[in-house]
Image (cartoon, helix red, strand yellow):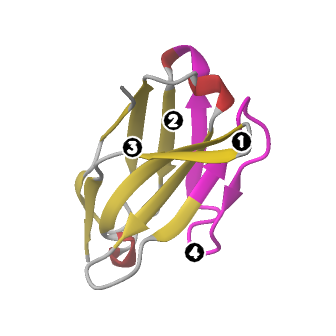
């Protein structure tokens, strides 16, 4: 059974920092690309950041580039999102996602989400 469990969310003032974690079980973590997405009330879920299987070059949405850092620890089957210089517009539920191509199929798993609230 595959499980992705996010933690580290909470309430922080504008300009503050938070570090999200997502622990993955039930899959060979090192073979999965990992992503962070977020969803604000009334909006579509949007892409935040990605890190490929085995590490390597990370990718970020322009709205978080230079403020957020995605990283992974394959030994702990965990992906992180370090969020600095937080803004009220970063307020959202943050989700981690694991994706891999298994044969011809693209397999996707999602966590349950963690709330991040940034006060002005």
Q: Tag 4 or tag 3, which sits nearer the N-term?
A: 3
Q: Mark 4 to mark 1: distance in Å? A: 20 Å
Discs 3/1, front: 1
Task: Tell me the element at label 1.
Answer: loop
**What's drawn in magenta, residue-wise?**
49-75
Question: In the image, is 59 to the left or to the right of 27?
Answer: right
Q: Quarter of the image containing the N terminus?
A: top left
Question: Which residue appears farthest toward the bottom when viewing the image?
Answer: 42
The residue carrying mark 1 is 52
Q: Mark 3 to mark 2: distance in Å? A: 8 Å
| x and y percentages locating residue 115 in the rendered image | 24, 57
Question: In the image, is 112 to the left or to the right of 29?
Answer: left
Residue situated in front as seen by the camera: 75 or 109: 109
Q: Mark 4 to mark 2: distance in Å? A: 20 Å
- Evaluate if marks 4 and 2 touch, with contact meaning CB atoms under 8 Å apart: no
Q: Mark 1 to mark 2: distance in Å? A: 11 Å
Q: Tag 2 or tag 4, which sits nearer the N-term?
A: 4
**Residue 3 on the magenta span:** no
Q: Mark 3 to mark 1: distance in Å? A: 18 Å
Discs 4/1, front: 1
The residue carrying mark 4 is 63
The residue carrying mark 3 is 20
Residue situated in front as seen by the camera: 104 or 84: 104
Q: Which numbered disc covers residue 60?
A: none
The residue carrying mark 2 is 79
| x and y percentages locating residue 49 in the rendered image | 59, 57
Q: Residue at x 40, y 43 (%)?
A: 19
- Evaluate if marks 1 and 2 touch, with contact meaning CB atoms under 8 Å apart: no
Discs 3/2, front: 2
């Amino acid at each position: 059974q595959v499980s992705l469990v996010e933690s580290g969310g909470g309430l922080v003032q504008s300009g503050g920092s938070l570090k999200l974690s997502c622990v993955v079980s039930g899959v060979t973590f090192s073979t999965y690309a990992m992503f962070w997405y977020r969803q604000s009330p009334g909006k579509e879920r949007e892409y935040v950041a990605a890190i490929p299987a085995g590490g390597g070059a990370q990718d970020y949405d322009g709205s978080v580039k230079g403020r957020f850092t995605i990283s992974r620890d394959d030994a702990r089957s965990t992906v992180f999102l370090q969020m600095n210089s937080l803004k009220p517009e970063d307020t959202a539920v943050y989700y981690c996602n694991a994706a891999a191509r298994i044969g011809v199929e693209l397999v996707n798993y999602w966590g349950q989400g963690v709330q991040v609230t940034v006060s002005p």
